[in-house]
Image: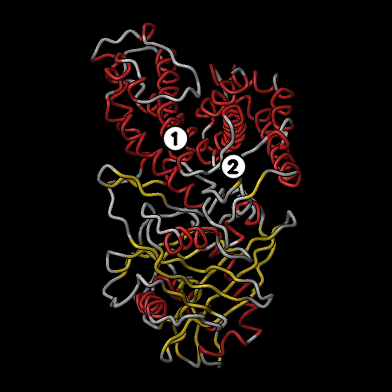
Amino acid sequence: MTKKTTETNLQAAYNFNDSWEELLENKAFVKAFLSDVLEDYILKQRWYGGKSSKLKYIELSEYFRIQQHGEVYFGLILEVNFVEAFYQHYFLPIAFVSDESFAQEDRILPISIKDQSGFIIDAINLEAFRKLVFERIHTAIPNDQTKVQYHKSLQFQDKIYESSRFMGLEQSNTSIVYNESFVLKFFRRIYANKNPDYEMSRFLSEKKNFKNTPAYLGSVNLVDSEKENITIALMQEMVPNEGDAWEYMLKELHKVFSNLEYKKIDIQKLPETELFLRLDIRDVPPQIIDWVGLNLFLKIQKLAERTAEMHIALGSEFEETAFTPTHFNGDYSVWLKNRLLYQFQNRLNAVENNLHKLDGLALTLAQEFLDKKNTIRKRFVNFDWTKLKGERIRVHGDYHLGQILVKDDDFYILDFEGEPESTIRDRKVKQPPLKDVAGLFRSFHYAIYATIFNHTDDYKHSQEELFEAGELLYKYLIGVFLKTYITKIQNANLNIGYSQERIFLLKYSLLEKAVYELGYELNSRPLWAVIPLKGITNIINH
């Protein structure tokens, strides 16, 4: 049977006499659409996050019109149910097109509506749809009370639609670039609550005027049948940039490691420093500056300033309860320990099941991880909130070099959606700001090891020597970061605790983050499991 005949047969099967505007009222259509077609389509989408689970069935949880001047599209909220007895919600906007040549890759279903043949497609592929969403946000009225609520900021005035294109391959969302100046992020995996990215972006931009994040311009939210406010899309300014801080760091670190040979540096003779010792650049020994260069330390200082300014903005709110600082308490302590002990057990199982994939240093460190499991568990349990004097605030939650853009010697922070494995409620729990700092430190550690792994043949030193140099460099980078960060935070009167408390929180958060990373590495690239394992060893032996 040819493809053409198959399509004709399908169209014969999906022939409805309803108009497009009434199609979703037709139960036969909805049933056929959900059970016969959508499962296959969804499984192939990059934004679908349920690939490791077994899909049971899909229900239409909600649908709504996205429309203007008689032009109608539908937004669907799909509830994907899994055999493992949990579900996820996804947003899918749909359009009907009758043009044969259109969206050949992204057709969901060939269909005939009132004897007009065509296809249902993901509406984001349609320029007319992208333009309509742009115009609905641009013409949004204050205090929109309708089911689909469009909002725009004061910065989004007097704009005319010129062009739109896909931003590129993203995992969990789809971003559209408008006029080469604005970015609209459609959230695909959605939650029955405001998305933290929308909340944080709007708060930092509109309320706190924080300049080092893309300015909030507008959004689309849906009020569902349970009266929950669901974020569908977020519009922000586009920050012209030279790439992200991860790529930047890898380039800089390659120069640093190349210098070992180029400058004939004896690694054994490089002066040591203590982990978490705060360092002014003037405190960094000349031999280290000679090896690393001044530029990288200056960039680390700038990044520390921007991180501190973000936390100062997030910790300076006294009206909006979602953002007011709070202290540590018993509830937080119980929540934290339960979460981490569950995650830790999960990672222990993963290490035991994947030992056969490891060798060399990774295997040695994995054995140590298993041998010291009680010590690590005890570290997590020994969270005594009564000794902590600092404040908890809303934090970035998934802060690493890949979430930071580099532009003209400065840094811009983006993607406030939070940790992908966490529930939406967990992402909004107020945390010590040092949790973000620890996330960034783990990212520094990763960048150092990634550079060594990516250039195995380029450096003449042994891997052991490079690891030794890398660990030393790591201590200097975080020392310089901490000095700038803590000074700025304290000058702004944000309370992040006394000195020992700060070190306790940093170690605790670094351990949490490294244990979290271990799961990802064991599942996707076991050779890199050495990085989080080394991070864990550093903390438990320090």
Q: Position of residue 328 (x, y in %)?
A: 68, 43
The answer to which of marks 2 and 1 sits earlier in the sequence is 2
For label 1, the SS is helix
The picture quadrant where one finds residue 24 is bottom right
Please name the residue that numbered disc 1 is placed on: 487
Q: Is residue 122 left or right of residue 50?
A: left
**Residue at screen point 27% across, 26% down:** 294
* Residue type highlighted by circle 1: Thr
Q: Nearer the viewer, mark 2 or mark 1?
A: 1
467 or 519, which is in the foreground?
A: 467
For label 2, the SS is loop
83 or 407, which is in the foreground?
A: 407
Establish if 303 lies above or below 7.
above
Q: CA distance from mark 2 to mark 1?
A: 17 Å
* Residue type highlighted by circle 2: Pro
Q: Residues within 10 Å of mark 1 (few under 14, many from 20)?
A: few
The picture quadrant where one finds residue 4 is bottom left
Please name the residue that numbered disc 2 is placed on: 432
